[in-house]
Amino acid sequence: MDRGWVSFLDSNQWRRFTRSELGSRLFRGRPFRAADLARRSAMSRYRQIRNPERFAATDVLCVFIGHVKSGGSLLGAMLDAHPDALVSDEVGVLKYLEAGFSREQTYHLIEKGSRREAVKGRVTARRLEPYSLAVPDMYQGRSEHVRVVGDTRAGPTTRRLGDDPALLDDLARMAAPSEVRFIHVVRDPRDPIAAMMRRGERTFANALADYESQCHRLVKIRELVSPSRVLTVNYETLVGDPSAGVASACDFLGLARHDDHLAACARLVDPHRDAERSWVDWPDGSSDALADLVASVPFLERYGQL
């Protein structure tokens, strides 16, 4: 039943309806959002009552920050394949934090999100060039001993935390006794900017301004969070050596390394995949504008020779 329902919600017909004028009005309206939040609250409370010790040994809540289309979904999918981790894609932890959901409720929703992504095959980039991030024969969507839970909704999470830093303390209180740790996947800025231009039909200037404002938020967040609780992952390094990149992330999160898991993650990565920057025509002056941006943002330092 669950697989059939997920398949329906993931169908092209349903997606077209949700993007239609009627669907957009319905699903973005306040009554529907309130009802959906109430439904999720009741469902997660029921699961908490049925399995109150499910997350008793969960040590870490992993929150992804960064720009859209920077590789967070890739790393999240590989971590979700670990036997002791549940990492959802695009659940949005802060939405439930602000709605007053408890630690256990939020973690149950992350588990549900992880399971649903596994049923859908961890397909991503639907509005650009869909591809699967499924790791065969591993543990995506399931875990017997949950040590780490996480969510990869980096873009909106960064916007909320950057605009309201007090949420950092609220997040820590909600997650306790788990420790909140952050993963920031950094990619050549031309790729996420190109993705914004193509997916949202934006101009270069508009996409660059959005990217730059997100950089300011990220700098603010990183100044407020202890460096020991932030792992910076360079996308190009991750793709070049996936086993080493995932192993480093496991160490950061306190997850044991498993050779079969690391090998399976390495097979997921296609090193020959075209970079998003090749999808768009870059206007005159874009190189200088990008160079000025890179020079002003510390975590972009490695891209100084664009």
Image (cartoon, helix red, strand yellow):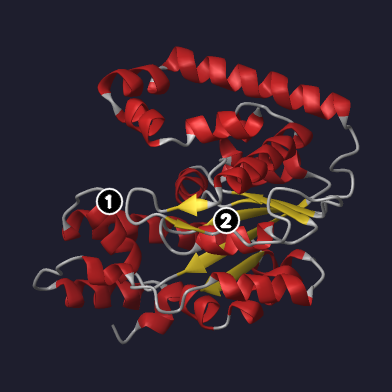
Which residue occupies 34% across, 26% down? Answer: 17
Q: x%, y% of residue 239?
A: 51, 77
Q: Which quadrant of the structure image shows residue 131?
A: bottom left
Residue identifier under label 1: 199
In this rendering, position of residue 134 left or right of residue 18: right
Instruction: Find the residue positioned furthest to the top.
Output: 31
Asked whether, in this view, residue 18 is left or right of residue 268, the answer is left
Farthest-out residue, bottom: 305
Residue 64 marker: 2
Amino acid beneath label 2: Phe
Asked if residue 123 lies left or right of residue 304, the reply is right
Task: Decide which of 188, 229 is in the foreground and name it.
Answer: 188
Q: Secondary structure under badge 1?
A: helix
Q: In this view, does 48 lie above or below 169?
A: above
Which residue corresponds to the image point at 77% horizontal and 23% vertical from the top-left?
A: 45
Q: Is residue 253 above or below residue 179?
A: below
Q: At 46% from the left edge and 12% from the top edge, which residue is drawn?
A: 31
| Closer mark to the observer between disc 1 and disc 2 | 1
111 and 284: which one is in front?
Answer: 111
Q: Residue furthest left?
A: 284
**First in residue order: circle 1 vs circle 2:** 2
Q: Which amino acid does label 1 sit on?
A: Arg
Left or right: where 97 falls relative to 213? right
Q: Is mark 2 on a helix, strand or loop?
A: strand
Kindly indicate the quadrant of the structure image that contains residue 298.
Answer: bottom left
Does residue 259 sit above or below 79 in this rendering?
A: below
Q: Nearer the viewer, residue 23 or 35?
A: 23
Residue 157 placement (x, y as % from top left): 51, 47
